[in-house]
Image: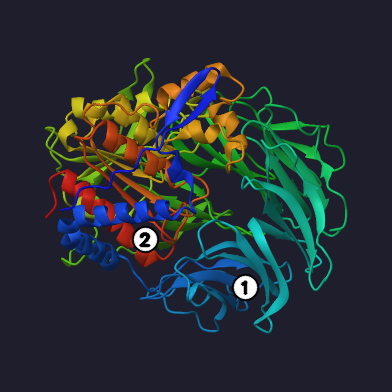
């Protein structure tokens, strides 16, 4: 096997608050430098050679994923207007095919062929496989049907940099309209005239900051509807379910503002909802009849729900008051009811508030699960479409009958027998919730799943996953690729650490800014707890995380390298100080309310420098590390893991460090499903090898 590439050291200095840092690998930040491309290619070649002995296992794992997946499949059709809308996949094809079918007279339930075959009378709206032809990468950004169901606005990205080209298709003729808008962002909203569409564009820092109005067939410049000058804020645009208002959602990490446009008056200027923008006050708004429903956190850490008249936003009437043990996450307004998504005791839930009668929660039997509203585009439904999953329950779609309060399972994601012919049986797996004690005494929840009969003597290998940022909760989810690990005796665990939102807003607040270190020590406390309680041993414990969870991986490698056998860091944010010091980079200014602003605050600078993985690489024994990245990632630049691995090799040369770069993808990695399965098989094979299970 060849030696790993050693990056040349070209010292570059920078000074902040009187502190001078020498960065030997800053040259790797130049994506257009042929020397950088050559270095990344050499890293890929080395990683391929270093893992060549796992080629057979990778293929085995890929075949296990592929065999257990029903390749020709069909999603549960969603009722919208006069059509059932659905997406289907076809064996051998990478991408989904988006379709619809007219609803037959008297038809109340969507047909779901068990073999994934097309529905009779199907109309193909978009075939991702045809769109992707000739491209290494393909992703859809926007998919919006016009109110009259005649037009489809969609956008495509062929590089992974999340800059999309917006097109409009006439579904009556199948023809593309001449309208074509480049460099758009996710999301769009139709006005009710069916000829006006609102869309977003980004600034140089990849921040959605402008809302535009486009009239189909117009030859002049599109109208700028709103521009956000404050670089802390980003924008979203949507049409309410009632189809009465276009909502412009202006949000920073701490503050929000809502602007409204009557959907039947697309040329109207947006008006500010309520008292407008106030620092530290977040809100979301939905429309219902003669009122707006408002979720906000003014004097309410975990949010309250109320309403205001459409004609007078100053009259606020409370519906659900604040509770310290329940975080209100979102509210969906329908004609005769509201549905609130909440979390309590680390679990998600749904509360129904009918126009008449008492509010109630929908009950579910599992001890650990994740539930939420699925697609419910109709304003006056007889049933609610729900999504449900757990660590042992495949993704499930339910219809909840509002009259009988009965749950009807429409479809559970098929899990086919593996190559050994053994069918998936959820009773052969068990899930647990355990609690670790953090350094400051805080109890941190851990969700686990394993095969029934897994020994509790420390001999079982364990994969511990974590994220812990942005109030994003890692709620229990099912995974077909994970079965390949569980069936080989691996325990899979999720550490619900501070910085996430599992236990409410305070859980998030205690893992950000100048309390960010709690995220890292919580994760290590979870790892130590799993060893102490004999779920595993440190010699068989592998950690995994991506993006901000990749920062977590880099931090724990420095903080407690003895706790882990190996670490997988996907698109890891391991050079945060460099990135957050540069306001010209994508996301930096909007991120200051998450991490702090080290340009302005010496305290923030010192705090970030103390935990930044890249800055704190030291000469000690590190776990084996696999870093995965993508060249066109706009969220976490490829150079962060590239610099990190280079410094690890230079400072702690006794360790094993591998890096793999997708040369034609973005933050989410390969876009096609088979390519994604191969990538997952690559990581799983490496993990099993580190656990001593490479067979």
Q: Position of residue 265 (x, y in %)?
A: 86, 58
Q: Quadrant of the C terminus?
A: bottom left
Q: Nearer the viewer, mark 2 or mark 1?
A: 2
Query: Which quarter of the figure has residue 564?
Result: top left
Q: Position of residue 65 (x, y in %)?
A: 28, 62
Q: Along the line of sight, which residue is nearer the eye, 647 or 262?
A: 647
Label 1: few (<14), some or many (≥20) within 10 Å? some
The residue at 81%/54% (across/down) is 224
Q: Is residue 314 above or below residue 489?
A: above
Gap between marks 2 and 1, in whole Å? Answer: 32 Å
Residue 83 numbered mark, or none: 1
| Mark 2 element type | helix
In the rendered image, is residue 428 in sight? no
Q: Position of residue 89 (x, y in %)?
A: 43, 72
The residue at 60%/41% (across/down) is 330
Label 2: few (<14), some or many (≥20) within 10 Å? some
Query: Which of the colour schemes (rainbow, by chain, secondary structure, one colour) is used?
Result: rainbow
Q: Along the line of sight, which residue is nearer the eye, 177 or 247?
A: 177
| Mark 1 element type | strand
Q: Is residue 493 left or right of residue 315?
A: left
Q: Along the line of sight, which residue is nearer the eye, 215 or 496?
A: 215
Residue with the mark numbered 2: 676
Query: Which quarter of the figure has residue 221?
Result: bottom right
Upstream in sequence: badge 2 or badge 1: 1
The residue at 60%/29% (across/down) is 593
In the rendered image, is residue 144 in sight? yes
Q: Position of residue 599 (x, y in %)?
A: 59, 25
């Amino acid at each position: 096997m060849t030696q790993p590439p050693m990056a040349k050291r070209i010292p570059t200095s920078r000074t902040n608050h009187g502190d001078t840092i020498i960065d030997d690998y800053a040259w790797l930040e130049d994506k257009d430098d042929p020397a950088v491309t050559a270095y990344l290619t050499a890293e890929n070649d080395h990683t391929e050679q270093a893992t060549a002995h796992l080629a057979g296992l990778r293929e085995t794992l890929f075949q296990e994923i592929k065999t257990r997946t029903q390749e020709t499949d069909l999603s549960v059709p969603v009722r919208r207007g006069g059509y059932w809308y659905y997406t289907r996949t076809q064996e051998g094809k990478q991408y989904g095919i988006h379709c619809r079918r007219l609803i037959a007279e008297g038809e109340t339930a969507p047909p779901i062929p068990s073999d994934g075959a097309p529905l009779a009378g199907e109309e193909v709206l978009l075939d991702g496989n045809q769109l992707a032809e000739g491209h290494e990468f393909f992703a859809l950004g926007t998919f919006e049907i016009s109110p009259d169901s005649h037009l489809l606005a969609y956008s495509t990205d062929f590089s992974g940099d999340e800059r999309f080209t917006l097109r409009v298709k006439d579904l009556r003729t199948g023809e593309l309209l001449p309208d074509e808008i480049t460099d758009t962002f996710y999301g769009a909203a139709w006005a009710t005239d069916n000829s006006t569409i609102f869309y977003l564009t980004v600034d140089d820092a990849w921040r959605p900051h402008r809302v535009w109005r486009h009239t189909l067939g117009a030859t002049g410049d599109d109208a700028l509807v709103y521009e956000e000058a404050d670089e802390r804020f980003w924008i979203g645009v949507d049409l309410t379910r009632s189809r009465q208002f276009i909502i412009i959602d202006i949000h920073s990490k701490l503050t929000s503002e809502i602007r409204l446009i009557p959907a039947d008056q697309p040329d109207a200027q947006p008006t500010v909802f309520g008292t407008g923008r106030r620092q530290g006050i977040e809100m979301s708004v939905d429309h219902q009849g003669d009122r707006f429903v408002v979720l906000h956190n003014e004097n309410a850490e975990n949010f309250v729900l109320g309403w205001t008249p459409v004609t007078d936003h100053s009259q606020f009437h409370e519906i659900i008051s604040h509770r310290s043990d329940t975080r209100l996450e979102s509210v969906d307004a329908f004609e005769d009811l509201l549905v609130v998504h909440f979390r309590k005791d680390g679990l998600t839930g749904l509360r129904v508030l009918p126009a008449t009668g008492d509010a109630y929660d929908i009950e579910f039997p599992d001890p650990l699960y994740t539930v939420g509203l699925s697609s419910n585009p109709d304003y006056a439904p007889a049933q609610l479409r729900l999504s449900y999953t757990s660590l042992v329950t495949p993704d499930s779609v339910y219809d909840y009958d509002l009259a009988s309060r009965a749950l009807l399972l429409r479809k559970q994601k098929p899990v086919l027998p593996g190559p050994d012919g053994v069918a998936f049986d959820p009773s052969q797996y068990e899930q647990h919730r355990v609690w670790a004690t953090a350094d400051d005494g805080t109890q941190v929840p851990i969700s686990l799943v394993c095969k029934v009969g897994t020994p509790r003597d420390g001999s079982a290998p364990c994969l511990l996953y974590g994220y812990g940022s942005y109030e994003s909760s890692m709620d229990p989810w099912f995974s077909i690729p994970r079965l390949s690990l569980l069936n080989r005796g691996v325990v899979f665990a999720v550490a619900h650490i501070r910085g996430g939102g599992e236990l409410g807003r305070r859980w998030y607040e205690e893992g950000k800014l100048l309390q960010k270190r709690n995220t890292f020590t919580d994760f290590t406390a979870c790892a130590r707890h799993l060893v102490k309680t004999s779920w595993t041993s440190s010699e068989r414990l592998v950690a995994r995380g991506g993006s901000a969870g990749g920062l977590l991986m880099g931090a724990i490698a420095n903080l407690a390298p003895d706790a882990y056998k190996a670490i997988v860091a996907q698109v890891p944010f391991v050079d945060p100080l460099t990135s957050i010091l540069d306001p010209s980079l994508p996301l930096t200014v909007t991120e200051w309310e998450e991490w702090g602003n080290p340009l302005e605050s010496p305290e923030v600078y010192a705090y970030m420098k103390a935990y930044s993985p890249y800055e704190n690489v030291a000469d000690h024994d590190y776990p084996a590390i696999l870093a995965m990245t993508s060249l066109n990632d706009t969220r976490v630049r490829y150079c962060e893991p590239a610099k990190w691995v280079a410094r690890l090799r230079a400072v702690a040369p006794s360790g094993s460090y591998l890096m793999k770069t997708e040369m034609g993808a973005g933050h989410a990695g390969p876009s096609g499903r088979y390519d994604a399965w191969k990538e997952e098989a690559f990581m799983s094979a490496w993990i099993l090898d580190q656990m001593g299970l490479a067979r």
